[in-house]
Amino acid sequence: MTTPTGPSSGMPASGGIVAVVERLLLSDEEVRISAPGPQIFDPNTGQYVPGPDVVAYEGPGLHRASGGPGVVLRLEGQPYKDDGDGRYLLFTPLSAPVAAEGSTVTIVKSKDPAASGRTFKVLDPGETGGMSVLRTTWMRIEKTGAAA
């Protein structure tokens, strides 16, 4: 027995498992994904300065720690990326845009008061795939608690 699909999406017509997962997992937090805006010219200094951030997405999401710091093996004289702080995962609906590397994620609202206002940097572009029910994005904590 197969589930009827919509005309072109390949997804179940009723939203199926995607709708259930989004309703169960993405109802407790609101997140904002923003990217650096284009540089603007400052006539006072004659220099280009970073423009305001551009919001790519704001809406339901969920973040969680993905485990502690990894193990770092260093070869004598070889540079390596410092792996000192924990990594986190961000889950957003498939309808949300894919977060770009270097974007900032802010927890706007959360059931956990300590999470509200935390900001993270996106480590890699958000994951995509045919079997996905949520968009997954790897990130690293940038700053704890503050007003969003």
Image (spheres, rainbow, N blue to C red):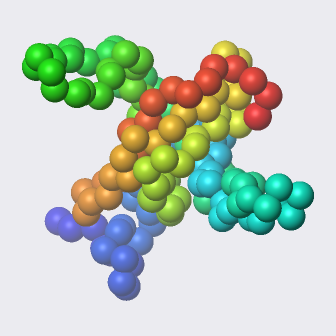
Task: Check the image and report above or below for 122 versus 117.
Answer: below
Task: Check the image and report above or below for 49 versus 119.
Answer: below
Residue 58 x/y as whole percent = 66, 52
Outermost residue, bottom side: 7
Asked whether residue 21 is in view, the answer is: no
Task: Check the image and report above or below for 6 versus 120.
Answer: below
Outermost residue, left side: 75
Q: Residue at x 61, y 59 (%)?
A: 56
Compare residues 48 and 109 and report the one nearer the observer. 48
- Tell me which corner region of the image, top left, top right, bottom left or bottom right, holds residue 129: bottom left
Residue 44 x/y as whole percent = 89, 58
Compare residues 26 and 108 and report the one nearer the observer. 108
Asked whether residue 39 is in view, the answer is: yes
Q: Residue at x 33, y 52 (%)?
A: 127
Q: Residue at x 36, y 67 (%)?
A: 12
Residue 133 x/y as whole percent = 36, 52
- Tell me which corner region of the image, top left, top right, bottom left or bottom right, holds residue 1: bottom left
In the shown orientation, is residue 127 left or right of residue 71? right
Compare residues 66 and 125 and report the one nearer the observer. 125
Quadrant location of the C terminus in the rendered image: top right
Residue 27 x/y as whole percent = 60, 39
- Tell me which corner region of the image, top left, top right, bottom left or bottom right, holds residue 87: top left
